[in-house]
Structure formats: structure tokens, C-alpha cells
Amino acid sequence: MNIEYHKWWSPYLQRDMELKIYGHGGIPYLVFPCSRGRFHDYEDFGMVHEISYFIDTGKIKLFTVDSVDGESWYNFSILPGDRNRRHEQYDQYISDEVVPFIRQHYNQEDVRIMLTGCSMGAFHTINFFLKHPELFCGTIALSGLYRLDRIEFGLPAHDIPHVFFNSPLTYFKDLNEPALLEWYMRSTIIICTGQGAWEEETLQDTRALHHLFMQKSIPAWVDYWGHDVNHDWPWWSKQMRYFLGHLYP
């Protein structure tokens, strides 16, 4: 398997950021790590190995990025608005640095990118897709939370105005701009959660997101796996193999 490592100083984040590339061709997949995760987690937890068939056969190519969750949504020492601002800098890093890097890598200015991630990575996957459908052609989101007013983030409902446009279930319900809806309808949307241990809140948010997609007549494959399916890497590996197998038979 062809693997590349890249690192550069991000002017938006004002620090070094790292990423890895896996594969030699195929559809570009931008991979977000789990909460406070690193760019190498997808490999370290065995996911790259588990989906290696799709990488080695040139069906997909992975671009695994770092997160700044510890400086934004999980930085409980700063105000909600400051956490939101740090995430917006990360948004600019992804949109204005990583996306052009991927397009240059493909030598194709208009290539649109698939997004994927597990847990907190799924949150980023949905948030970036909904906000930038002109850049991203779809998503495979596994076991995500899709609203920020949850205990995990330490953001009660009265703080939501400070983070409104980064809480997907909050802003998506009122989002009806025709141009955006058209982008969504032309995209590949896959959202999945289990119903086992540590999946109670992700199940709630997945159902709520599913309802909004149906309400807006946006095609989405929302899949609910069994009560034995836990919030953990072995199940996410099985889910990724399953969905990639359907997309690239």
C-alpha cells in the first residue's frame, strides 16, 4: 500500500498540522478522527487494514487529518464563543488548505471529496458536509452526535446561540436554501449507528437527523444496526467494509 506523510504550518490554526495518505487512486476520502484524535488513529485502530481491499484496488484513497477538538469543543476552560471560533479556524484549515491540497494531489480543480469518520469524526463529517456541499460529494458517518447541547460537550441549551452554526441538528432544521438542498440531493449520504452499549445518544441524534432528511426529501441511507452493536472500532470496521462494498462492488 502506498502511504505518504505530510506536515505543514497552518496559517489559519497557527500551528503545524499533519496528515497521511493511503492508496494510489480512486475516490478521495477525507477521514476525521474520533474525539481529540490524531491523523494516524485510523491506521492505529486497524481501520486502514480492514478496508485495505478498497484502497489497494484503487477504489478509494484516504486522507486522514488531525483534529483540534482539544482546543475547541473539548476545551472546557474557555467560553463557548471562543470554542466556536477555534473550530471556525479549523473549518478554514480544512476548506482552504486541505481541500486544495487534495485537489492538487489529483490535479483536478473541481474534484469533490467523500467524508467519513466515527464518533466525533462523524460529527465533523456531517457538519462539514452540510456546510460545504460544493466541496464534498457525500458522507459515511458512523455513531455520531449531531448537536452540541449535550453533557459530553459541556454546552447547555442556553449556550447554543454561541455555537449555533456548528450544531447540525440545530441549524439544519431551518436550512431550506434551494441551492444547498440541490447539492444535498446529488450527494451520497450514509449515516449509521448501532443500538448497543454507548450508542444511546448517537441513536437519538441519528433518528433526529434521519427525520430531517426525510422531511426535506433528501435521499439518505440511514442504517440502524442491532442491539449487540457497540460504540467501538470492531463494529465501525464491519460497517465501513459493508458500506464500501455496496458503493464499490
Image (tube, grey):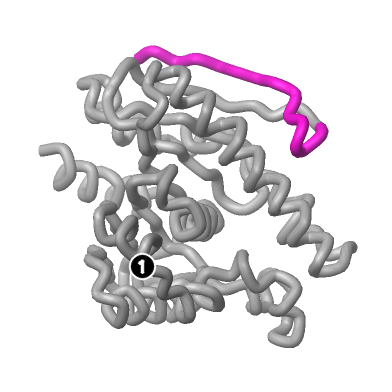
Please report the residue visible at 23 percent of the width from the left and 43 percent of the height from the top.
Answer: 244
For disc 1, the marked residue is 178
Q: In the current view of this chain or complex, which residue is farthest to the left? A: 249
Q: Where, quadrant-wise, is the C terminus in this rendering? A: top left
Please tell me whether residue 13 belongs to the stretch shown in magenta: yes
Q: Position of residue 186 (x, y in %)?
A: 25, 54
Q: Where, quadrant-wise, is the N terminus in this rendering? A: top left
Please report the residue visible at 66 percent of the width from the left and 20 percent of the height from the top.
Answer: 7
Mark 1 crowdedness (10 Å alpha carbons): few <14, some 14-19, many ≥20: few
Work out whether residue 23 or residue 193 is closer to the camera in this orientation and state it: 23
* Above or below: residue 228 compared with residue 69: below
Q: Is residue 112 left or right of residue 124?
A: left
Type of residue at label 1? Answer: Pro
Magenta residues, as a range? 1-14
Please report the residue visible at 47 percent of the width from the left and 40 percent of the height from the top.
Answer: 31
Q: Is residue 194 left or right of residue 41?
A: left
Q: Quadrant of residue 183?
A: bottom left
Secondary element at image label 1:
helix
* Above or below: residue 243 compared with residue 76: above
Q: Position of residue 29 (x, y in %)?
A: 39, 36
